[in-house]
Amino acid sequence: MTNYSAKILNNSVGALNAQQAVIATTSGNIANVNTPGYARRTVDLQTRLTSGSGSGIDVGNGVEVGRILRIADEFVERQLRSATTDLGSAQVENQYLSRIQDLFSLTGDRPTISSSLTSFFSSLNDLQGEPASIELRNNVITRAQDLVNTIGDTYSALASMQDEADQRLATEVQTVNSITTQIATLNGLISARESNGTAVAGDERDRRDQLLNQLAEKLHVTVVPGDNGQVSVTLNNGFPLVYGTNSRDLEVTNQPTFSATPPPGLSSQRMSYIVYDYDGTSAQSHADLTPGITGGTLGGLLAIRGRNDSTNTSAFQADGHLVAVASRVEALTRNLLTTFNAANLGPDRTPAAGFQASSADLDGNAPSAFGFFSYTGNTGATATGQPTSADLAASGVDNFSSSLVLSVSGPRGIAAGRDLSGGAVTPVYAPGDGSNMAGLLTLQNQSQSFALGSYSFTGSYDAAYGETITTVGSAKARAEVNERVAGSSKTAAQTRRDEVSGVSLDEEFTNLIKFQKAYQASARMIKIGEQLLDEVLQLL
Amino acid sequence: MTRIAQGQLTRRLLFDVMNNYKDLDRASRQVSSGYKVEKPGDSDVAGSIQNFRNTLQKVESYQKGISVNRAALAFQEDIIKQVSELMGRAKELATQAANETVDTATRQQMATEIYQMREQLVVFANSKYQDRYIYGQADDDDPPFDSVVPGYTTPATGNSSTRYVFDGELGTAVAQSVNITDDISVRTSSSGQTVFSNAIGALETLGRALEGYDTTLAVSATSPLGLPTGAGAAYTLPAQRSVQTGQIQITIDMIDHALTTDLTPERTDLGARLNRLEVAESVLESTKYTATEGLNSLQNADSATAISQFQQAQYSLQAAMQVTSKVLNMSILDYL
């Protein structure tokens, strides 16, 4: 015969325990309502099974705690990571592009390359009307110096942004390394705790999910769940960052072992590469991971800074927003150094006897090949007497924009006139002759070709600048849209995650009341059980 | 059942409030700066905006050039007008003197007046504008007409021995010009030789003839009646009186020639060039208008629209904030 009295007490004690476990879990949930990465827990209550082989009518054995469940959905987590990666890169790109577009203001509140160029040509036209005027000559020099300064400033701003992005890569990579190390450690803890098959290392998993999210913000990674609750993390190209309890540290270096002379950056400082050092000693130990890193802050920084193949020789062979814009500035500089300087020399005075400039300054001296614009360190050597892009290439200088200088000696040194002798041994000039200015002025509206790296454009200076503006503007507008889209898709992904894993206080409080009442009821059951026994005892 | 967790709610509300702030920021910038496009990324017509700006900058510079050069051309026009009047008076004098009844002494008195006119003419030809000799063209740092003393071997001294020649230095044939639009340029200088040589030569020949000296004339393509060479002997008067009178009559033709082939065309040409400046000016004015209008519509914020957008942004931000505070304040705890 079954002892029901004992059963009442047993069931009630079990129930007290179970309700307490639920209330404790609820208290944990409420405590972590604002903890990032926390996934709510629920208690899996189940009926207790009959132990032994009792016979008779089964009135039930009460309740017991089955497992504590951590409510998380791996697919939702994956969506969140992917959205985080997109937002990471969109934010960085948008940030840098808005700084780039500041250099090309459209409101006329500060000089731009375009306004300086137009002012410069206007000053040339003024001088053409009155070529001997020292005042107007001074004005040309001022405007030309403004142009040189604006080009230099614009280019330096782009170059220092590239350096800055390059340095940020190193900082970000350190963060990535520290995250991957922690993930590997947590992998070990989780597999140890979960080895018995029923326990869930919830806190460790919360922490690891949070770290994976932080990692996803830095770069695009693939997370694959493995045995014992461990995860492995790989880059886009399959390179493993975390496998089991091991992690691999990335390095940022501008002296990779795979290239003796990596290409320079815009500022002539070498480009950095993200590498993995296989053994740290041998000559070829670096593996270049730069191409495999996409998305996230790192991917965004690389998209801004540009990636350059280590076999290239020029900063302008790289891709990236900064390089694209800087190429356009540099192409203009090179045009000034070659086409404009060549026009400044005028046509060949003596076609039969090698090139001789036909223009002359106020003192009757012909300008040198780089007689209007030059660059620091220029030897002035030319192959033909006229400056050409081949001469620039032979100089070994990668960018001329940062070292562009005005080489006109002074107001009298502007070559406004041309030889009037018709090719005599000694050229003759007239002070009021502005015919060389006319030659320079035709350049303003003439279609020319600008090309550097992947940039190529044919048109006037204004048209070329317009194209630059459009390039910067559309990149910025795209980045803006990308950031908005990525922002809202991350919010959506977080919402979906919260829907599954987030703590709802209302729910928790409702549970609290429910289980508190159940606890009270069970406690009352014990009292009733006691009373039942008392009744019997009083019979004695 | 869809679960709504607290975190989810706050995040969503915060995201909306932030977006509303962004819109408000944009709208308030439009109102305060007056621009709806400030940076290339603000619009896909940034290239056109830049073009309009370039156009306006150029137009401004061309307009400045036009007003400077209009003054220069008006100055030249005034000179030519005075020179033409001067030549007209010289012609009257020459016509009087050509009368056989005018005696030698009177002719000599008239010569003094003619020489004064010649000096004035040379002053006009050597006139300076903005400190440059305008009739020297590219050679504008020294006077285009120089006096040669003694210019005539007979007589050895006095006005009739002075001769003026065009210095003909290199550059005097090179005209100065200036661009008044992207494609049109206008000449701002004229050659002193073309404009003044025949006139000065005519007055010189006339003065010498009235004083009683013959002047040898050399014919050239631009002066078919000839310019003084520096040779010429004294007339034997009264025997050669009719020869003297004949020479005076030749100078009348020379004056007419200078007026009809040099001075009048120059005056007409100056008028035409001034006219071109006017035309260019009005073209620039309309270019400026179009560019300003274009810029206005592409770049400037319409204040009524901007303000109403600002108010709209303000309302939606307020609404979002109210909703946020209401929703976040709700808790089941209040009912327990």
Image (cartoon, rainbow, N blue to C red):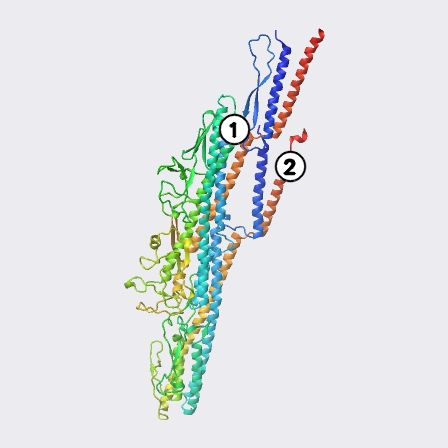
- x then y, percent, for residue A419: 35, 67
The chain letter for the residue carrying disc 2 is: B
Query: What's the mark number on residue B103?
Result: none
Which of these two is toward me, B198 or A304? Answer: A304
Local crowd at mark 2 within 10 Å, few (<14), some, or many (≥20)?
few
Please tell me whether residue B307 is drawn above or below residue A20 in the rendered image.
below
Residue topped by disc 1: A204
- For label 2, the SS is helix
The chain letter for the residue carrying disc 1 is: A
Query: Is residue A67 shown to the viewer in this render?
Result: yes
Please tell me whether residue B236 is drawn above or below residue A119 in the rendered image.
below
Q: Contact (CB < 8 A) between labels 1 and 2?
A: no
Q: Which quadrant of the rendered structure holds the C terminus of chain B?
A: top right
Q: Residue furthest bottom?
A: B238
- For label 1, the SS is helix
Residue topped by disc 2: B326
Please tell me whether residue A268 is drawn above or below residue B336 in the rendered image.
below
Which of these two is toward me, A281 or A130? Answer: A281
Q: Mark 1 is on which residue type? A: Glu
- x then y, percent, for residue A122: 45, 61
Q: Mark 2 is on which residue type? A: Lys
Q: Residue furthest left?
A: A352
Based on the displayed image, in which of its 4 quarters is residue B19 positioned? top right
- x then y, percent, for residue A305: 44, 45
Which of these two is toward me, B23 or B325? Answer: B325
